[in-house]
């Protein structure tokens, strides 16, 4: 393998300064891999010629032996070079067979890793700044190989030995677990996908799932019960078992536990990996290990490799041969607990070597809250972005406010909202009829707060002007107002949107516009923002009430990355008439996407009526992981204010 020529890049500059610390991640089965391997081969085969020749020769040698015994297990043959030259579709379903996917997933990951190094990254400096390497299922093989820090012929020898072992792992697992065709009697009570030896399922706890499996086994006396092979998240599990037993379990769930049955999804795999059912394959693989002469020792690992079940640092182990044989066959995986451990590491970047996005997807909820960049190096675009020195994001907990003081000495909670607006991060939303009149708007302004003036009751230009004039005269010096305009009311929008710009030009203190009751199409929204800001109206908000609307606002924000937008997410509780959604669900589902934009200030409302609730949203852990927002807006609660019009009886009830 040719020596890597190091070219200057922003990433290496940050590494040299000690600014970045890395986690290396390698995925397992379940994602397509051949298209990725083809891409690297086409782009980098001149620089990585030794690597690809080693891969082709190794697999050709092992296949020549295996096909003497069972050629029917290899319907595609094994001419990998021909496949990479375009003579096999990357989507061919036979590629998911373990006899192919095992060695070729590792080959794909190492191709991504070597491309990374050939892009101007010094391996020794990279490993010196790497806190740990982890692999999901068979991904642990890639983690172990890279963590040795080998180069040149030493790397190729270790790579070749591991490819040979994974080739025979595919053979032995096929030998131990032949495909099964299920009869009608096993399928008649199950209406979902055709059962296979493994299935994903969602359940609120492993204890409940184990209890259900125990109850099921009382009805499944013919075979051993399925096992929990992997835990991929707090509520995400993978079951492994004999195909017939898995089919019976699916039917049992349909009858007894419909909530679990609806989440059951059979995987496109050829055997029950991560279960005791693979024991016979492991016994035969032990012989293959000795024959191949594969040697891995914990003391030779430059980087800690964490066991995906216990989180143990494999540097503490001696001979890892038996561990490698068992890692993706009979050993369990608890990715949830591993990632909780990993999230405590001081990391700036998680480098993901594929295949696919699976490894990033199951790590996202653990790493993103800490601001860790998940760099997808299985794609050229992800690699290019990282090489530019892509910096870590802000940790979610850092969005919580800190105590500050205004120039006049008054205390204030400082966060993105208060820094941008100069006002308290608790404000009043525009609400017809409560804030149509000006009393509450003025009362809030006198304390340095915002209550939006509702455009819903300003039905003529004369009415709008008269109330705005009184507002202007009553405002404290230097204070402005925010006007809430109803986008979906065509009459009011066509009247008020041009009018606010005109009145601003006339000198009225309009600082911002909240666009509520609908989100304009992107092109129109950009025109609106441009026109408002050109008029000097800078404190502008959109008010989404669904995930689809939130996505629309994100797309608008992406198109004006140099402008700050306030997003007022409204849930359907209390008087939240712009939404039927649960506010907490909306934020949990979209928080990561929102926080990935630097130009969005996130505020929430809908059913918030006590100071303790506002504090929870702004700075306390209302959910796990923590997701502090930048502001809280009140609506129905304001109807109980002294300046509001409802009777004292209604105010008391509110």
Image (tube, rainbow, N blue to C red):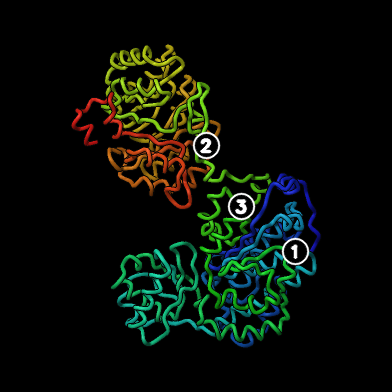
* Residue 135 relative to residue 181: left or right: right
* Residue 368 relative to residue 532: left or right: right
Q: Which of pointers 1 and 3 lies earlier in the amino acid sequence?
A: 1
Q: Position of residue 651 (x, y in %)?
A: 23, 32
How far is the residue under mark 1 from the one under mark 3?
Answer: 21 Å
Among the 4 quarters of the image, the one containing residue 54: bottom right
Q: Which of pointers 2 and 3 lies earlier in the amino acid sequence?
A: 3
> Is 250 rendered above or below residue 185?
above
Q: Position of residue 78 (x, y in %)?
A: 63, 75
> Label 1 near label 2: C-beta < 8 Å?
no
Q: Say what secondary structure mark 3 lies in.
A: strand
Q: Residues within 10 Å of mark 1 (few under 14, many from 20)?
A: some
Mark 1 vs mark 3: give the one in front: 1
Q: Position of residue 648 (x, y in %)?
A: 20, 29
How far is the residue under mark 2 from the one under mark 1?
Answer: 44 Å
> Is 239 rendered above or below residue 392?
below
* Residue 371 relative to residue 607: left or right: right
For image coordinates 69% across by 46% down, the residue present is 19
Q: Which residue is denoted by mark 1 in the rendering?
A: 149
For image coordinates 32% across by 21% down, the residue present is 495
For image coordinates 45% across by 67% down, the residue present is 237
Among the 4 quarters of the image, the one containing residue 39: bottom right
- Closest to the observer: 110 or 16? 16
- Closest to the observer: 81 or 287? 287
């Amino acid at each position: 393998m040719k020596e890597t020529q190091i070219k200057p890049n922003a990433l290496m500059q940050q590494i040299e300064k000690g600014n970045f610390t890395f986690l290396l991640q390698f995925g397992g089965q379940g994602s397509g891999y051949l298209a990725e391997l083809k891409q690297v081969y086409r782009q980098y085969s001149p620089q990585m010629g030794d690597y690809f020749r080693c891969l082709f020769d190794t697999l050709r040698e092992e296949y020549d032996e295996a096909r003497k015994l069972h050629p029917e297990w290899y319907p595609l043959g094994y001419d990998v070079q021909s496949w990479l030259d375009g003579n096999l579709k990357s989507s061919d379903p036979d590629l998911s067979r373990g006899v192919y996917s095992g060695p070729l997933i590792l080959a794909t990951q190492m191709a991504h890793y070597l491309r990374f190094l050939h892009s101007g990254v010094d391996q020794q400096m990279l490993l010196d700044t790497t806190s740990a390497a982890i692999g999901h299922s068979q991904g642990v093989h890639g983690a172990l190989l890279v963590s040795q820090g080998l180069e040149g012929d030493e790397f190729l020898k270790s790579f070749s030995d591991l490819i040979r072992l994974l080739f025979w792992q595919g053979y032995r697992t096929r030998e131990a677990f032949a495909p099964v065709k299920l009869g009608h009697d096993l399928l008649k009570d199950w209406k979902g996908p055709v059962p296979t030896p493994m299935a994903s399922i969602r359940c609120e706890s492993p204890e409940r799932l184990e209890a259900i499996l125990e109850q099921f086994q009382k009805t499944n006396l013919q075979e051993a019960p399925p096992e929990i092979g992997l835990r991929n998240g707090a509520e995400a599990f993978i079951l492994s078992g004999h195909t017939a037993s898995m089919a019976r379990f699916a039917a049992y769930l349909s009858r007894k536990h419909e909530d679990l049955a609806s989440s059951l999804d059979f995987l496109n795999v050829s055997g029950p990996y991560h279960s005791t059912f693979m024991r016979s394959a492991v016994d035969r693989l032990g012989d293959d290990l000795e024959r191949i002469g594969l040697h891995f020792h914990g003391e030779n690992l430059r980087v800690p490799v964490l066991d995906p079940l216990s989180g143990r640092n494999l540097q503490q182990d001696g001979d890892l041969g038996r561990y490698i044989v068992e890692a993706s066959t009979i050993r369990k995986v608890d990715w949830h607990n591993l990632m909780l451990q990993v999230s405590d590491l001081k990391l700036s970047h998680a480098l993901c070597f594929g295949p696919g996005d699976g490894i990033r997807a199951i790590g996202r909820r653990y790493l993103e809250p800490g601001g860790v960049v998940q760099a997808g190096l299985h794609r050229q675009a992800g690699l290019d972005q990282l090489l530019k020195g892509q910096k870590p994001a802000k940790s979610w907990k850092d969005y919580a406010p800190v105590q500050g003081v205004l120039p006049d000495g008054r205390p204030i909670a400082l966060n993105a909202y208060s820094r941008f607006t100069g006002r308290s991060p608790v404000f009043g939303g525009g609400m017809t009829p409560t804030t149509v009149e000006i009393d509450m708007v003025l009362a809030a302004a006198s304390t340095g707060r915002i209550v939006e003036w509702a455009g819903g009751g300003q039905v003529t230009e004369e009415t709008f002007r008269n109330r705005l004039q009184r507002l202007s005269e009553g405002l404290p010096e230097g204070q402005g107002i925010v006007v809430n305009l109803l986008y979906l009311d065509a009459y009011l929008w066509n009247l008020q949107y041009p009018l606010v710009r005109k009145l601003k030009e006339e000198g009225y203190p309009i600082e911002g516009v909240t666009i509520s009751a609908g989100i304009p199409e992107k092109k129109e929204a950009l025109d609106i923002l441009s026109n408002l800001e050109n008029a000097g109206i800078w404190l502008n908000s959109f008010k989404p009430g669904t995930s689809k609307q939130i996505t629309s606002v994100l797309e608008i924000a992406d198109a004006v990355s140099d402008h700050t937008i306030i997003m007022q997410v409204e849930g359907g509780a209390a008087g939240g008439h712009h939404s039927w959604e649960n506010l907490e669900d909306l934020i949990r589902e979209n928080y990561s996407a929102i926080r990935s934009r630097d130009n969005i200030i996130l505020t929430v409302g809908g059913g918030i009526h006590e100071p303790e609730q506002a504090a929870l949203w702004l700075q306390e852990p209302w959910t796990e992981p923590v997701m502090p927002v930048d502001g809280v807006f009140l609506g129905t609660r304001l109807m109980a204010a002294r300046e509001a019009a409802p009777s004292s009886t209604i105010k008391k009830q509110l």
